[in-house]
Image (tube, rainbow, N blue to C red):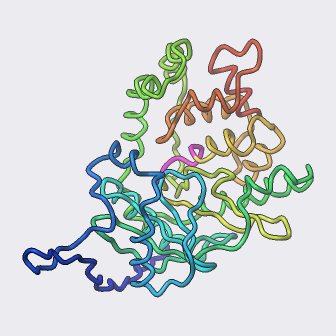
Amino acid sequence: MRTRARPEFRRVAPRPHRQRDPRHAIIIPVPLLPFIPDADAFRAVRTADIYRPALAEIARRHQLVGEPRRYAGGSLPVFAVGDEHVVKLFPAPFRRNRDNERDALAFLEGDLPVATPALHAADELDGWPYLVMAQLPGRRMDEVWPSLARPDRLRIAAELGELIAAMHALPVGLGAEAFAQVVWEAFIDERRAQCAARQAARGADPAWLGRIPGFLASLDLADAREPVFLHTEVMPDHLLVDGAGRLSGLVDFEPSMVGAREYEFASVGLFFARGDRELLRAVIAPSALAPDDALSLRLCGYALLHRYSHLAWYLELNPPAPGVATFEALARQWFAL
């Protein structure tokens, strides 16, 4: 089994950002980023245009060149700086997410058939942890997908399947200590117990809420195989395609963990295949999963139990076909195999 030492990151001494109090002629530090005590406070500033002074200081620290431009969407502020770097900011309550992405990138470096961001620095500013990463070439798959012909889509699906299989084949006994923070069985048990309440808080239809306990109780999600490294959000927003139309990159490892391999394919079915049987079969083929009705049901179960599950949004994104009124029927529509 391989081992890899965690890379050393040089902490650069920050340059004080201060203003002078004319009454006392003393220097008072002025934060470049606001204090964020919890997730609710972050939601109030997540999309605000407040990050440029902080980005300027980070660019100074790490000798980054170029104007910052914010990537659209995403749950955290992420900026391209020039043509070579990316800066990702994490408010203090999300420190563990920063650490997880840092360790995932170090663990994966050079071991996948597509590029992942090289990690240049992991530091913090005004209590906000951040990462400085290499900017990968290519275009996001969600931008390219509408223009692709059917054969190209099927080819990319096969490439995605090979990528996932290679990622799941990486030995996680050593070098993935950070991801062991999630105890898989306890994680799934807790997600089962709180699933209906979480979906209710996110505005799910009461009719569907009432069907959740029975559906989850009917599923056997035990997996006797060895746990694997999971990206957990393999979707077009996080995949890059090169100029030749080939899969070239995978980004956003903040929610990665170690667990059951089938969990990976919930996001693939919901956001990539979207009910297309041929596409989903092409993705799962390299992983040697049986493409049967039982797998469709388990993938639907994992979609409900996913760390960022949002049933109301899923139903809006992929509306149930006429007559679909159970999770069993919904599973056969969303995860057609």
Q: Position of residue 185 (x, y in %)?
A: 40, 41
Q: Residue at x 45, y 77 (%)?
A: 3
Q: Quadrant of residue 329?
A: top right
User: Is residue 114 shown left or right of residue 245?
Assistant: left
Q: Residue at x 47, y 75 (%)?
A: 132
- Report the quarter where the C terminus lies: top right
Magenta part of the protein: which range?
257-263
Of residues 259 and 191, which is closer to you in this image?
A: 191
Q: Quadrant of residue 68?
A: bottom right
> Is 226 part of what is drawn in magenta?
no
> Is 259 part of what is drawn in magenta?
yes
Can you say whether 49 is above or below 329 in the image? below
Can you say whether 22 is above or below 139 in the image? below
User: For the view shown, which residue lies furthest in the front direction?
Assistant: 23
User: Is residue 142 shown left or right of residue 102?
Assistant: right
Q: Residue at x 31, y 53 (%)?
A: 93
Of residues 314 and 67, which is closer to you in this image?
A: 67
Can you say whether 334 is above or below 126 in the image? above
Q: Residue at x 64, y 70 (%)?
A: 112
Q: Position of residue 169 (x, y in %)?
A: 60, 62
User: For the view shown, which residue lies furthest in the left direction?
Assistant: 24
Count of marks overlaid on the render: 0
Q: Position of residue 118 (x, y in %)?
A: 55, 77
Of residues 16 and 23, which is closer to you in this image?
A: 23
User: Is residue 14 shown left or right of residue 118?
Assistant: left
Q: Position of residue 307 (x, y in %)?
A: 46, 41
Q: Quadrant of residue 155?
A: bottom right
User: Is residue 44 shown left or right of residue 206?
Assistant: left
